[in-house]
C-alpha cells in the first residue's frame, strides 16, 4: 500500500482539570501518513504544540498493542473510533480520508471523572474488581493444573469473558453510562471455573453493589456496549450476571430467614 498523506481538521476536547468547564480547540493535522496509528497522529500534533510553547494534549496510553485498555477516547461520537473490534491505539489513519473533520473527546460518564483533556479516572473499575473479582480461598501451594479439569466449553466461555480489557468503551457508548457489560464479564469469567465457586454468590452481590455505588447507570438493553467493545464481549454475559444475582440474593434472603428462626 502506498503511503498517502492526509490533511485533517481536529476538534479536541481540552480541559485543564476536573473542575474546569472544558472546551473544544481546533488544530490542523497536516501531512499525516495513512500508516500512522491514531495515537501517533496525536503525537505529531503534540510535538508541534510543544515547539510552539503550548500545552500538549493529554491522553492515556501504555501498551499501544490493544491489550491494556488505557487508550480510550471518543472519535466522531464512537468510542475507539470507526473500526469495530479495535482499540484507539490500533486504529490507523487509513480509516480516514483527506479533508476529514474529527471530533475527539473523552469518555463521558459520572463514574469516569475527567482528569485532563482526554484522560479520565477509571479507578471505579478497579474498585469493582476489588469488591469481589478475585479468588481468595487459601489453597496452599500451586497445584498441577491438570488436577482440576475444566470442560472445554466452560474454559472457552471463561476466556471469552476474560478478554475484557476494562477500557470503559461500554460505559462511553451506553446512553445510561452503564458498566454492566464490564462487571458481568468479570463476574462471569470466574463463575465458569471451579476456582470461582466457593465465593460465587458473595462475588456477584458485592461487585454489583459496588458498581451501583460508583454511580454508573442501569442497563436498558440498547446493546451499544457490545457494538463498541474492542474485544467483542457479548451482552449474553449481562443476562448471566442477572441470573447469578437473583440466585445469590434469594440465597442470602433464605439464610437471613433461617438465622431469624
Image: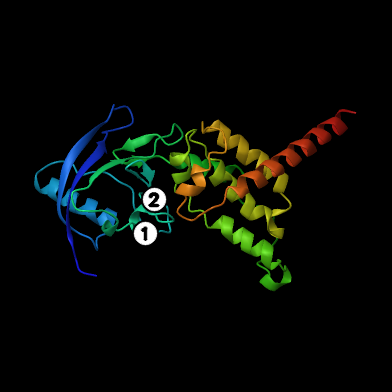
Give x and y (percent) for residue 189. Answer: 62, 55
Q: Residues within 10 Å of mark 1 (few under 14, many from 20)?
A: few
The numbered mark at residue 201 is none
The scheme the figure's colours follow is rainbow
Label 1, secondary structure: give it: loop
Taking the image as drawn, is residue 135 in sight? no
Q: Which one is earlier in the sequence, the residue at label 1 or at label 2?
A: 1
> CB under 8 Å between callouts 1 and 2?
yes
How far apart marks 1 and 2 lie (CA) works out to: 8 Å
Q: Is residue 67 left or right of residue 135?
A: left
Taking the image as drawn, is residue 101 in sight? yes
The numbered mark at residue 63 is 1
The numbered mark at residue 70 is 2
Residue placed most toward the observer, 171 or 225: 225
Give the image quarter of residue 157: bottom right
Label 2, secondary structure: give it: loop
Residue drawn 57% across and 51% down?
234
Give x and y (percent) for residue 237. Answer: 62, 49
Residue drawn 33% across and 31% down?
18
Q: Is residue 139 above or below residue 134?
A: below
Q: Residues within 10 Å of mark 2 (few under 14, many from 20)?
A: many
Q: Is residue 99 above or below residue 92?
A: above
Image quarter where the N terminus lies is bottom left
Image quarter where the C terminus lies is top right
Residue placed most toward the observer, 13 or 128: 13
Residue placed most toward the observer, 1 or 39: 1
Give x and y (percent) for residue 46. Answer: 18, 49
Residue drawn 33% across and 48% down?
60
Q: Is residue 219 left or right of residue 149?
A: left
Amino acid at each position: 500500500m502506498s503511503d498517502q498523506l492526509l490533511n485533517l481538521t481536529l476538534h479536541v476536547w481540552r480541559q485543564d482539570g476536573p473542575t474546569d468547564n472544558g472546551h473544544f480547540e481546533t488544530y490542523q493535522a497536516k501531512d499525516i501518513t495513512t500508516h500512522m496509528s491514531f495515537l501517533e497522529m496525536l503525537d505529531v500534533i503534540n510535538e508541534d504544540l510543544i515547539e510552539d510553547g503550548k500545552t500538549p494534549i493529554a491522553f492515556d496510553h501504555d501498551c499501544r498493542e490493544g491489550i491494556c485498555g488505557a487508550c480510550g477516547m471518543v472519535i466522531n461520537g464512537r468510542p475507539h473510533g470507526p473500526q469495530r473490534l479495535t482499540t484507539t491505539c490500533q486504529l490507523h489513519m487509513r480509516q480516514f480520508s483527506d479533508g476529514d473533520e474529527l471530533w475527539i473527546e473523552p469518555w463521558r460518564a459520572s463514574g469516569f471523572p475527567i482528569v485532563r483533556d482526554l484522560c479520565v479516572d477509571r479507578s471505579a473499575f478497579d474498585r469493582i474488581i476489588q469488591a469481589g473479582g478475585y479468588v481468595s480461598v487459601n489453597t496452599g501451594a500451586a497445584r498441577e493444573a491438570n488436577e482440576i479439569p475444566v470442560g472445554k466449553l466452560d474454559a472457552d466461555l471463561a476466556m471469552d469473558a476474560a478478554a475484557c480489557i476494562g477500557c470503559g468503551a461500554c460505559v462511553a457508548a451506553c446512553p445510561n453510562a452503564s458498566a454492566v457489560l464490564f462487571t458481568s464479564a468479570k463476574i462471569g469469567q470466574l463463575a465458569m471455573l471451579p476456582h470461582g465457586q466457593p465465593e460465587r454468590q458473595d462475588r456477584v452481590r458485592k461487585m454489583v453493589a459496588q458498581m451501583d455505588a460508583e454511580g454508573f447507570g442501569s442497563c436498558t438493553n440498547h446493546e451499544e456496549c457490545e457494538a463498541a467493545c474492542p474485544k467483542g464481549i457479548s451482552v449474553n454475559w449481562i443476562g448471566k450476571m442477572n441470573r447469578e444475582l437473583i440466585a445469590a440474593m434469594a440465597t442470602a434472603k433464605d439464610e437471613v430467614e433461617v438465622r431469624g428462626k
